[in-house]
Image (cartoon, rainbow, N blue to C red):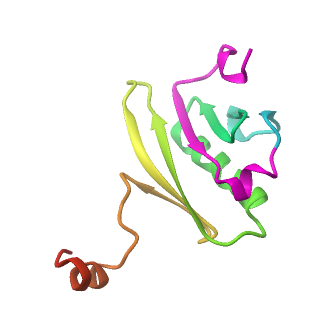
């Protein structure tokens, strides 16, 4: 039985992302405690991370805390994530690690407008 097949007690909000290999090698699968504000952080085999909770902000706070610990000695990374809301809609996010830790909704371009305009004629 995989960890994801266990029933969730929370689940109004669920943030999921796949850890890059450079980070996945340093975390063990299973439920991680303690978590902030009643959130639940689970790491499955292969580096899939699931953070569940009753509110949006504590989930992002827990993800920020998680990355500050496991990516402390690593270079900058950008990780794609999805947030499922109570309405069962899915929001796309990018997590920018070691920039401190930043969240960008809907894959907002991280390249400055001038570079974007010069290179692609957009911006």
Q: Where is residue 76 in the image (x, y as percent from the top left)?
A: 62, 70
Residue 1 image-quadrant placement: top right
Q: In this view, does 17 lie above or below 30?
A: below
Question: Which is more toward the observer, 21 or 102?
Answer: 21
On the rendered structure, is 26 left or right of 97? right
Residue 92: tell me if it is visible: yes
On the rendered structure, is 26 left or right of 55? right
Q: Say which residue appears at 16% left-offset and 79% top-offset.
A: 121
Q: Where is residue 118 in the image (x, y as percent from the top left)?
A: 23, 86
Q: What stretch is highlighted in magenta?
A: 1-27
Q: Say which residue appears at 35% left-offset and 66% top-offset.
A: 109
Q: Is residue 121 magenta?
A: no
Question: Which is more toward the observer, 112 or 62?
Answer: 112
Q: Is residue 11 magenta?
A: yes
Q: Say which residue appears at 60% left-offset and 31% top-offset.
A: 53
Q: Position of residue 54 (x, y in %)?
A: 57, 29
On the rendered structure, is 102 left or right of 72? left
Q: Position of residue 33 (x, y in %)?
A: 82, 37
Quadrant the C terminus occupies = bottom left
């Amino acid at each position: 039985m995989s960890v994801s097949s266990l029933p969730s007690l929370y689940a109004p909000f669920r943030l999921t992302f796949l850890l890059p290999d450079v980070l996945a090698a340093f975390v063990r699968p299973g439920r991680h405690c303690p978590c902030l504000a009643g959130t639940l952080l689970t790491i499955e085999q292969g580096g899939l991370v699931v953070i569940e909770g009753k509110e949006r902000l504590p989930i992002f706070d827990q993800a920020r805390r998680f990355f500050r610990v496991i990516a402390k000695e690593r270079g900058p990374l950008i990780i794609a994530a999805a947030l499922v809301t109570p309405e069962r809609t899915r929001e796309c996010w990018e997590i920018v690690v070691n920039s401190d830790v930043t969240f960008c909704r809907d894959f907002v371009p991280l390249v400055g407008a001038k570079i974007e305009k010069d290179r692609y004629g957009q911006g």
